[in-house]
Image: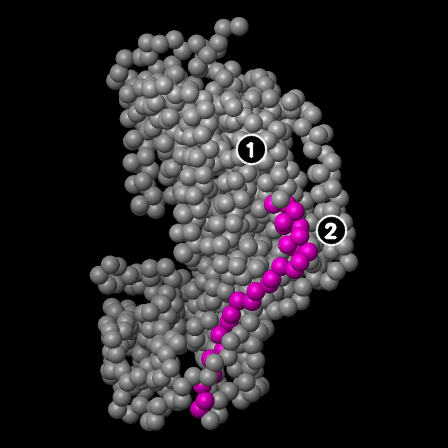
Amino acid sequence: MTPVRLPGRARPWTSRIWWLALLTLLAALALPARAESVALTRERALPQLPDGAEPAALTALAGQLVVQGQDTGWALAPGAAAWRPVRLPDDGGLALQATAVDGPRGYRLLGDQALQRIDALAWSGDRLVATPVPALPEPLRDPQAAVLGDALYLVGLATDGRARLWVLPRTGTGHGAWRSLDGWPGDAAPQSLAAQKSALYLADDDGALWRWTSDAGWSRRAALPAAAIPGQVGAIGQAHLLYLLQSPGGAQPRLFHVITEAWADWPGATPAAASGRVHGDGVLWRGAGGALTSSQLQAGRHLLRALDWVVISLYLAAMLGMGFWFYFRDQADSTSDFFVGGRSIPFWAAGISLYATNTSSISFIAIPAKAFDTNWQYMTNNLMAVVGLMFVAVWIVPLLRRLDLMSVFSYLETRFHPAIRMLSSALCIVMQIGARMSVILFLPALAISTITGVDVVWSILLMGVFTIVYSTVGGSKAVIWTDVVQVVVMFGGALFAVGFMFWQSGADLPQLIDAAAAQDKTRLLDFSFDLTKATVWGFVFLVVFDVVLTFPKDQVLMQRTLSTKDDKAAGRSIWAFAAMMIPGGIVFYGIGTALWMYYRNNPERLNPLLPIDATFPLFIAAELPAGVTGLIIAGIFAAAMSTLSSIINSVSTLVSVDFYQKIARNPDEKTALRIAEWSGVGVGLVGIAIALVMSRYDIHSLFDVSIELAGLLGGGFAGAYTLGMFTRRANTAGVAIGVAGSIVITLVCWSMDLVHPYFYLAISIALCIVIGYLASLFFPPPSRSLEGLTIHTPAAG
C-alpha cells in the first residue's frame, strides 16, 4: 500500500458520511433551538416549627436551621424529617448581627449597637459548640462576614464612619491575628458579604456591588437591581451568588453570575407576602401562618434526540470500521508496521495527527471553559510554541528520525545507558496515563453526563472501551488516519458552535464585543513578572524547556514523526503541525469568548449547579437543534479519542520496545506485537480506573489539573534529552542525578505552592539540566562515539 492511495480507496464510504453530516447541518438550521429550562427548583414543605419556638429567631448556623425558644433550642439538619432539641451556646444577651457559613461549621457575630463578639461554631452531636475567636481590634457597626479560603473576612463601619475590611487567618490549631485591609470606596454601610471564585462580593446600602480580590483590591461591579436584604446572600456552585432583594411584594430572589456579571430571575416560584432567607442552594420561605417551604435548585437534564444518536452512532461506527479495515487489510506482522506505520505516512497526515493528538478533549471543553472564565492569556502558549516548533523542525526531529527509532527513549540508551532509557520510559508511561489519559477520558464523560443524564461512570466506560478496541486492533496506521478524520469532525463542530452562538446571542454583536473588551475577556498578553500567574515570560520559559529543548520526551508526538519516510518528511510534519496551532487556538478560545457573550445576554440559560468546565457541554445540550448536538458531541469524541488512541498506541509501544525487548532473553516480533496489543488494553483499563476516581471529586479546572500533573511527573526525564542532544559533556551518572534531583525539588515547590502550576514542568526540566550537567563534571566524560547523537556531532554524510 502506498500512503497516498489510502484516502482515495476510502472515499466511497467516507464521502457518504460527509454528505450525511452536511445534510444534517442544513436540516438543523431550519429547526428551532431548545427552550426547556436548564435549572429547576424542587419545592419541599419542611416540618412545622416546634411549639414554643420564636419564628423571628429562625436562622442557619453551621449548616443547620436553628430556632430558639424561651428555655431550649431546636435544629433541623439537611434532609431531616423533624426538628430535634439541641443545646445552643449562651449569647450573653447579645443580639445576633450576622453569620458566616463554612460548610458544616460557621461563625456568628454578636453585639448591640456595635460588634462585640465573634464565635466559631461547630456541631458536636446535639450540642452547638461556640469558641470565641480573637477580639477585633476596633468596634464595627453593620458587620458582615464571609469565609474565603483559609481566612475569615469581616466588613463594617468604624466609629469614624469609614469602611473597614479585616481578615483573620485560620491555622491548624485555631486562628491567627487580625489584619487590616483597605475598605471599599464610598463608605456606605454593608448589607451583605459573600465569597465566590477567590473573591469577596459586598452589597452596600447605596445599591452598589463591590468585588475584592487579593491582587486587585476593590472594584465596582454590576449594580444591584434593588436594595439587598441584609445578610441574605449565598454562593451557589462555582460561579453564582443568590441574593434576596427587596420588592413591594416581599423578598425577591435573584441570581448573579460573577463571570458574566449578569442578573437572572430565580427559576422557582416566589410566594406572595412571605419572608425568606438564603439557605443551601436555594431559599427557605416562611409564610404568614408560619409554614416553612424549601425551594432548592436542581439541575435539568437534556436528553439526546434520535437524530443525535444517529449521528454519534455513525461516527463511532466509522472509527471502529477504520480500525478493523486496517487490521484485515494489512494484518501487520512486524513491529515496524504496528508501531510506526511501516514508516510510510505522508508528512501532511503526520502533521494533522500531531495536531489531533495535541488537541484533546482538554482543548474542546476545558480551554473554552478557561476562556469563558478568564481570558485568552493561555493562548500565548500557542504563539510561543509555533516559534519553538520551527527550531524543532530544523534541528531536533531530523536528528532523531535519522536514527530509525521506534521508541524515542532508545536514544537515551545509545547516548547514556539502558537504565536511563528504562527509567525515563517508565516515568513517561506514568505521566501519560495519570496526567493525560485519565483527564481526557473524564472531560467527555462530563459532557455526555451533562447532556444525556447517563452516569459519568458509564460514559467513561463507553469512551474508553471504544478507543481501546480501534487503537489496539488497527495499530499506528489506524490511529494516524482516524486522527485526520477526527480533526475534520472536531473543527466542523467547533466552527458551527461559534457561528450558532453569535447568531443566537439575541443582542447587538458590536455591543457584546465591546463588553467583552471592557472586561478583558480577550486579553492575550500579560508582561508582569508575577510567578503565581500565567504570564508571557512564563510561557516563554515553558516553551523553551518544554518544546525547544525537550520535544523528544513525548513518545506520543514523536511516534508520528518517526512514521514518516525520512528526516525531511519528519521535519515537514512539524511545520504542518505548527501551521495549525494558531488557527486552532483562535477557534477554541473563541468558543469561550462566544460563550461569555451568549450567557451575558442570556444568564437565565446557565445552570448554577454545574461546574465551569461544563459550560460548553451545557450549551451543546440545551441550545443546539437536534442533529447538530449529536455532531458536536461527535466532535468532542473526536477530540478525546484522537489523543486517547495515540496514548494507548504509544504507551503500548514503550512497553513492548523498552521493556519486553530489553528484558526478554530471546525476544521475537510476534510476541512483541501480542504484548503491545495486550498492554494497550491494560493501559486503557488503568486510564479508565483513574478517570473513575477523578469523577468522585469536585475539581474546579481540569485544565489546570492536567498541567500540574504533567509538570510533576514529566519534567524529570525530559531534561535528559537536552543534556544528550545539546552537550557533549553530560554522562550517565550526572543525568541520573539530574533526573532524581529535579523530581524531588519540584515536589517540594509543589508542596509549598510557590509558583503557578504552569511553571512546574519548566522548573523540573531546568533543574534536571542544571543539576545533571554540574553533576556530570564530577565524572569522566563519555567514552563512546557521539556521532549523530548531538547537534554538535552530526552523522557523517
Residue 623 as seen in the image, left or right of residue 153: right
Determine which residue is flagged by label 2: 25
Res. 707 in view: no
When asked about the image quadrant of residue 198, the answer is: bottom left
In this view, the residue in front, 391 or 63, is: 63
Residue 178 as seen in the image, left or right of residue 756: left
Residue 17 as seen in the image, left or right of residue 226: right
**Outermost residue toward the left in this view:** 173
Helix, strand or loop at mark 1: helix
Res. 442 in view: yes
Residue located at (38% from left, 84% from top): 58
In this view, the residue in front, 676 or 137, is: 676
* Image x and y of residue 234, in percent: 45, 70
In this view, the residue in front, 421 or 516, is: 421
Which region of the structure is painted magenta? 290-316
Mark 2 or 1 closer to N-term? 2
> Does the magenta portion include 293?
yes
* Image x and y of residue 361, in percent: 54, 45
Determine which residue is flagged by label 1: 474
* Image x and y of residue 105, in percent: 32, 69
Residue located at (74% from left, 36% from top): 12
Residue located at (32% from left, 9% from top): 783
Helix, strand or loop at mark 2: helix
Q: Is residue 584 above or below residue 660?
A: below
Question: Mark 2 and mark 1: span between their CA atoms?
Answer: 31 Å
Under mark 2, the amino acid is: Leu
* Image x and y of residue 589, in percent: 59, 46
Under mark 1, the amino acid is: Gly
* Numbered label tally: 2
